Image (cartoon, helix red, strand yellow):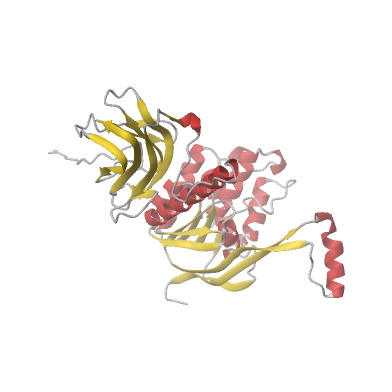
Amino acid sequence: MMKNTVIDVRDLSKKFRIYHEKDLNLKYAFINFLTGKKSSYYDEFWALRNINMDIKKGETIGLIGENGSGKSTLLKLMSRILFPDEGYVYTEGKIAALIEIGAGFHSELSGRENIYINGSILGFKKKEIEASLEEIIEFSGLERFIDNPIKTYSSGMYVRLGFSIAINVDPDILLIDEILAVGDENFQKKCLQKIDGFKSEGKTIIIVSHDLTTVEKMCDRVFLLDNGLVASEGAPVDVISDYHKILFEKEEKALRAEQIEKMPAAAPPQEDESPAPEANRWGSKEAEITGIEFLDERNEKCDVFKTGDFMKVRIHYEAKERIKKPVFGIAFYREDGIHINGPNTKTSNYDIEHIEGKGYIEHIINSIPFLPDTYLFTASIYDYSCINAYDHWERCFKFSVVESERIKERYGVFYIPSEWRHHGQ
């Protein structure tokens, strides 16, 4: 174990059994135990495989990923709620785990009595709990109700009490699962302030959250879990970008599978095409758009860019006859339908004398101004009057923009290069 390491995870794997017939579990488990046979009534599911982490004292670490990626399972292994099937987790210091808040509460006992019970479950001695008792009660905001049985508490009061116990017993390591799902807005602010205090005291914090803004703001490093594996690890903005890329690729794969399923078996879509529903495509077809490519600065196909990146859009066409002064147009939309921009070759004073046969035209953006989101793209060919469409594909193509380390803005649609100047006394 390396110096200053307080959590050492090595070759960690955890599996669960998924039973097919739940009401037969005990019976068949007993029979299989006697006969030495492996049960055919369940499948083995590996929630985590070969996880390795080295977490230093004072670090704040984020765990992100889709639901079912293994984040909460990893926290439970760190807190010893679960135990690994392979590998090990070594921790040094007292741990408070905000995972299953309120686990061990007794409904007939008062809030005060449950503070002692829950604190002892977390591994703290009576003297340690007593030293933090008033702070716990005050933090929860339940002073008026603390001596009432917790069966009379609302669900919000119940969670606030459990959270207050775990966060006020002065742990060395704090494990947090979805902090922003706890309590109302004011209580959430108190929790974040408390965690900021932990950071300034040099405590080690592990956060699982789908709130990526909070993860980016609070964490020193982030691990991305995907299907039980570490898919990426590093600076928050880079790992969050990797996460968005994975989500976008999965969305594209699912969309393509859906398109293939809907199309006739004899005519599946090609690898680099995005077939448009007829409702989203129109025109007289003397000239047709035959393909769209999004290219990066290396001239390689790319569907995921970062704010500030170079992007080239290549529009392939085929003109069935000689067409004079065609106008190529494009448009960008945010996925929620906001129209961002709609240039064309005519308004840009880029006249094309004629087209005939196959060719392509490129629209080049040296620095993408879009902030992180998913965007839809329109491409079209019109006559010079811009009234008659030869071919118009309306919002039939998609690309994504993810976070950039060098551009910190996250709010709105555009990044606008600018500077601040202060003129004080």
Give the side of residue 74 with respect to residue 339, left or right: right
Q: Residue furthest front?
A: 321
Q: Picture coordinates of residue 349 (x, y %)? A: 19, 32
Q: Is residue 358 above or below residue 72?
A: above
Q: Is residue 347 above or below residue 293?
A: above
Q: Is residue 399 visible?
A: yes
Quadrant housing residue 267: top right
Q: Is residue 370 above or below residue 46?
A: above
Q: Picture coordinates of residue 258 (x, y %)? A: 57, 44
Q: Residue furthest bottom?
A: 1
Q: Picture coordinates of residue 32 (x, y %)? A: 84, 70
Q: Picture coordinates of residue 180 (x, y %)? A: 51, 45
- At x 33%, y 22%, the residue is 387
On-image quarter of the C terminus: top left
Give the side of residue 128 with respect to residue 350, left or right: right
- At x 39%, y 59%, the residue is 220
- At x 72%, y 62%, the residue is 43
Q: How many marks?
A: 0
Q: Is residue 168 above or below residue 409?
A: below
Which of 407/44 is in front?
44
Which of 204/127 is in front?
204
Which of 367/14 is in front?
367
Q: Is residue 139 visible?
A: no
